[in-house]
Image: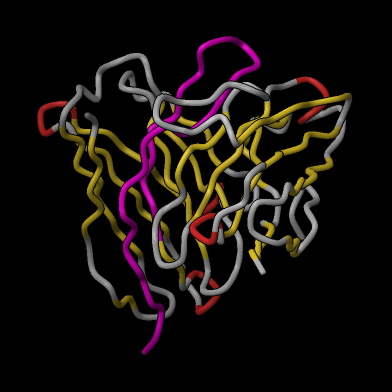
Amino acid sequence: QVQLQESGPGLVKPSGTLSLTCAVSGGSISSSNWWSWVRQPPGKGLEWIGEIYHSGSTNYNPSLKSRVTISVDKSKNQFSLKLSSVTAADTAVYYCARGRSRTLHSYYFDYWGQGTLVTVSS
Amino acid sequence: QSVLTQPPSVSAAPGQKVTISCSGSSSNIGNNYVSWYQQLPGTAPKLLIYENNKRPSGIPDRFSGSKSGTSATLGITGLQTGDEADYYCGTWDSSLSVVFGGGTKLTVL
């Protein structure tokens, strides 16, 4: 059973950089899956941030692309998120998730972390 | 404003059936499979349906999915109070990103 666990600071100052890590257990990050970050502002819906493959290939949400960096550490079986120049609008629960793409037009998240709340405030 | 459109809320009585719609365009639903997620209060989303109508192991057959053109539908039969949750549809978009619906809150009266 694959498990994902997010970790990182729960409070970030405005204009600072949000940094989170997702530890993967019960499976290899080098498997044929994509690894994503998804966020959910309080009381609102889900927003996909971006994803990474174990090779280092990435895709980002166009609306966040200029501020996002996702990286992978295969030796630690984990991947990370950095979001720069944060504002109060970036306050959200941040989830990591495993993305599966069985065919060219198929993509879904089958495993999710429990989520971690990050608040942007001075 | 979400790329995919869902009704904000739906409700039905225990034992009844409910459907939740998800509307998109040719750049997303029209050319890709749809997945559905259930988010119980205070928890992470959980995969309910993938590739339009497939259920992961452990998901009861009370949950079903379908797709036609640029719209998809989640159906839930035999409603239980434990089904009260937010439901989200999701799919891949030609902008090279994953897109979600705004979510639908299901109330079991």
Q: Which quadrant, please, contains the N terminus of chain B?
A: bottom right
- Residue A40 in percent (x, y) is at 51, 62
User: In terms of depth relative to the viewer, which is nearer, A42 or B52?
Assistant: B52
Residue at (83%, 39%) from the top-left corner? Answer: B24
Q: Residue A49, relative to residue A44: is it above or below?
A: above
Residue furthest to the left in view is A75
Q: Which quadrant, please, contains the C terminus of chain B?
A: bottom right
Q: Is residue A106 magenta?
A: yes
Q: In the figure, residue A55 lies in which quadrant?
A: top left
- Residue A61 in percent (x, y) is at 59, 44
How was the colour assigned to the protein in this rendering?
A: secondary structure
Residue at (79%, 26%) from the top-left corner? Answer: B67
Q: Is residue A81 magenta?
A: no
Q: Residue B37, relative to residue A6: is it above or below?
A: above
Residue furthest to the front in view is B15
- Residue B33 in percent (x, y) is at 68, 23
Residue at (55%, 43%) from the top-left corner? Answer: B37
User: In terms of depth relative to the viewer, which is nearer, B78 or A4?
Assistant: B78
Residue furthest to the bottom in view is A122
Q: In the figure, residue A57 lies in which quadrant?
A: top left
> Is B87 left or right of B10, judged from the image as shown?
left
> Is A117 left or right of B23, judged from the image as shown?
left
Q: Which residues are drawn in magenta? A: A94-122
User: In terms of depth relative to the viewer, which is nearer, A63 or B14?
Assistant: B14
Residue at (65%, 31%) from the top-left corner? Answer: B64
- Residue B39 in percent (x, y) is at 50, 55
User: In terms of depth relative to the viewer, which is nearer, A64 or A43?
Assistant: A43
Total numbered labels:
0
